[in-house]
Amino acid sequence: MADLIPSGYRFSTVTSNDHGGLIYIAAFLGFTYSTLCFVTRCGIKWRVFGLDDWAMCVAQTATTIQFILVIVSLSAGLGKNFDFLTENQYLRMASMQYANQIVLYLSIGFSKIAAVLLIQRLFTRDARTFWIICNIVTALMVVWTIIAAFMVSVGCSPKSTAPVAESDTCPSLIARYQVIVITDSLTDILLVLVPAYLVWQLQMSTKLKLQVISAFAFRLPLLPLSILAFTNYYRSLHSNNPGVDRTPAIIFQQSELSFSLIAATAPCLKSWIRGFDTGSGNKVEYTSHGYSSNGYNGGSYKMQSFGSQNGDKGDVKVSSKPFAGAGHGHGRGRANTTKVTTAALSSRTQREEDASITSHSSQEMIIRRDVQWEVRREDVR
């Protein structure tokens, strides 16, 4: 059997006493997929960056840091039998993993914050109740992120979070992880229920509502990943070879982090956003000024003019024309009448409007509706 294994240098091996190669695969794949999704998000929303995108920037930065920490800890002996490590290697590995857990939960937390801010961005500020709901959920995600980062670190030493023996485990560490996993699952469920409730208030077909909800329900697989990470970590504490048996827990954590970042980006894809069609000519789309959404029962339309940069290309045009003979001195007894016409027009096709989301910073009339006002003033002498 040994003859079947080719000799030579290997970047990493997988043996009964070294599962570091499996962690390498999970770390590299997770980081690659999440980074590709982040780059795709930036490409889609380059000219309409909002708070949700900046939150994702923080999450991706934290992910990059934790990826580096994982690689460093792997070089120090992560995934190996602790008996094969020197004291310095073990301390370095434990320290890197200690820092990794903090940054990992910060990254997961900011991906949740980005998801809430995206929900908030897709719904109008005029719907005060929905706006308040989103603000409350955002605050909850911020609090969860801070608490989770503290709970995996405060009061524990690096060695006590990666113990050689069960007796060396940090007191209450298991209880802390239980709280984190439970609240992590609850917040992910909340991130599905909130958009589901908001979308259900829109005047659109049930099919389209389910399509939009499914984009946010993409987070649901995070629940079993979080639970599996905890159960495998707990099992490794009672193992005779904790260094190797902790490998599945680390792999599930890397998978959870990557999937959390991907799930926060999935609703940004145009195929999902296009589903926000209320069926009455109203759409929910990105705008460079924050939030635009219409179609609520009792909602209001919010229109905003943009300065014309090239001649007469603005969306809102104002023209002032006097009646014939007015103001030219052709008769003192004639009525001085001025006609002011203000028109907000949009003649874009559906394809042009869809393209405007990314190519024109969405500074176009999102509601395809022609409105004209006419104001007359007459002075009779």
Image: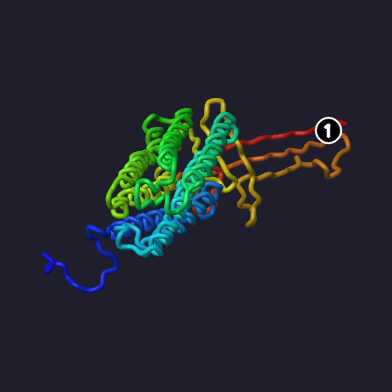
The correct choice, above or below, for 280 with respect to 27 in the image is above
Q: Is residue 352 visible?
A: no
Element marked by disc 1: strand
Residue 108: give x, y in percent of width and height: 45, 47
Residue at the outermost bottom position: 8
Figure quadrant of residue 129: top right
**In terms of depth relative to the viewer, which is nearer, 282 or 134?**
134
Q: Quadrant of residue 264?
A: top left
- Classify the position of the C terminus by image quarter: top right
Q: Position of residue 219 (x, y in %)?
A: 39, 41
Q: From what the image shows, is residue 118 above or below residue 30?
A: above
Please give left or right for residue 10 compared with residue 147 in the image: left
Give the residue at mark 1.
379
- The spot of residue 130 in percent (x, y) is 54, 31
In the picture, the quarter occupied by the N terminus is bottom left
Q: Is residue 119 left or right of residue 3?
A: right
At label 1, counting other C-alpha atoms closer than 10 Å, the crowd grade (few under 14, some 14-19, many 20 or more) is few
Who is closer to the viewer here, 367 or 202? 202
